[in-house]
Image (cartoon, rainbow, N blue to C red):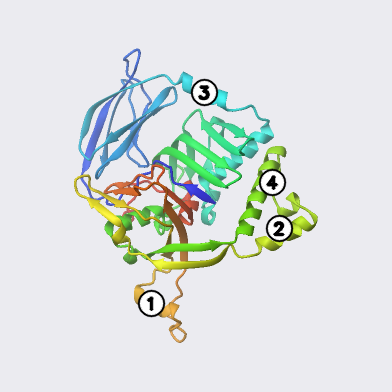
Amino acid sequence: MKFYFTLTFLFIINCASAQIIISGKVIDEKTKQGISGVSVYLNNSTFGGQTDTAGRFLFKATLIGKTTLIISHLAYERKVYSLEDKNVESLLFSLKPQTNVLNEVVIKSKKYSKADLTKWITLFSLNLIGTYKGAGHSTRLTNKEALYFDFDNSNNNLHVFAKAPLIVENDFLNYKITIDLERFEYNFNTNEVLFKYFAFYEDSPRKVLTTSQIQKNRIYAYEGSAMHFMRSVFKNNLEAQWFDVYQYDAELNKEKSRIEKIIRQKKAEAYVKYNTPDLTLNGLFSGDTLKYYKDVLNQATVIKSEFSPVAVSKFITKDKQTRTINFNFPDTLTVTYDVNKLNREKKIAAMMGKNKDRTDIPQPIYLYTYMYFFKPEGINIRSNGYYPELSLFMWGDMAERRIAMSLPYDFDITSP
């Protein structure tokens, strides 16, 4: 599945920074009175809290560079505020009631039967949470009733709206994640997912696993992830972190691509027509068509491919004034992560077959991710993280991880 990294995520690079204080007040735009119970948090982090009865908030956070403050309340329009790495006190935010916004959500959505709603909720939850390595089985969306759906038959595009922040419980990583959904689209024709949301992480009060097991699971989620990769790009230590980057050129099987497009179209039609559609090939096609499609699908997707090693350092530009690194590459990149964590010497020995009489050299096991920049300016990696902002398109291992394997930007791999 292809995945557009439009999540407004931040991937922290280094947590060893002094804490700063963030404080202020949230008021109603008309009455000028303080609003209690407003969530104020740094996006994709564990830093934040709620306003008191007077609308005031105060919390400490670890920051390096620029980040985003989210001000969110069920009855008011959300605000997004940019912050730098310094004490930010006496902030004042005035919020507008979001009655009109809720009305727009209801108008855009359509009335569906219970069976249809179950179908759309299942599809949304699957794409939000994911099934990566089975972690999705211990992650659930707890307030599905907050969702509204709009399916466009003309282009087989599903839009999902939320009338309230979504709550996700992740027992595998022991996080309670509050999600302010900005945008969700799923296209059946292309099998592409487009997300944009803000997230606040808290340690889950459930804690079904031991502290030791939770930390092991979090490290497992971190290794080979987009967060791990971006930190390594920033520090220029990709090889030491078991990443390799290649320029990827391929000649695709055009007939297989054509057939896959037809199958996706048929699946979309079946999904709309039936409450419990049979999405297998046998359920969608019959006779000679079924046989031919099966034969084509058994063919290789790539007829011919070439991988050329890339020195990432040649494609990054440092900006000392803004403390950012720009990463740009004109073609598709293949990023591999070696699960067995072999150093260069052992990896070469394993690849050349020199380990036939040496059982102490394991074979490299790779996780593959493909990515390209679809804006000419590439992406910017700040000292406190990476802001995708509709600039990076990726598919493969990193893209499949979803919420079930996501970590807050302040995650520190060295701390329990």
Residue 86's quadrant in the figure? top left
Q: Decide which of 403, 189 is in the foreground and name it.
A: 189
Q: Does the rendering let one see residue 330? A: yes
Mark 3 vs mark 2, foreground winner is 2
Residue name at image x 35 percent, y 42 percent: 45
Compute the Cα span from label 1 to label 3: 59 Å
Mark 3 → mark 2, Cα distance in angstroms: 43 Å
Task: State the image coordinates of residue 192 (x, y, percent, origin top left).
Answer: 54, 46
Location of residue 222 by image quarter: bottom left
The numbered mark, 1 or 2, whose residue comes first in the sequence reads 2
Q: Which residue is mark 2?
A: 293
Residue 79, labelled with which disc? Answer: none
> Please, is residue 133 above or below residue 198 in the view?
below
Q: Position of residue 25 (x, y in %)?
A: 28, 24
**Which mark, by number, is residue 346?**
1
| Picture disc at residue 104 | 3
Q: Position of residue 351 (x, y in %)?
A: 44, 77
Query: What SS does tag 1 mark?
Result: helix
Instruction: For marks 4 and 3, give the CA distance.
Output: 31 Å
Q: Amino acid under label 4?
A: Lys
Q: Amino acid at mark 3?
A: Glu
Q: Earlier in the sequence, mark 4 or mark 2?
A: 4
Check disc 1 and give the amino acid type: Lys
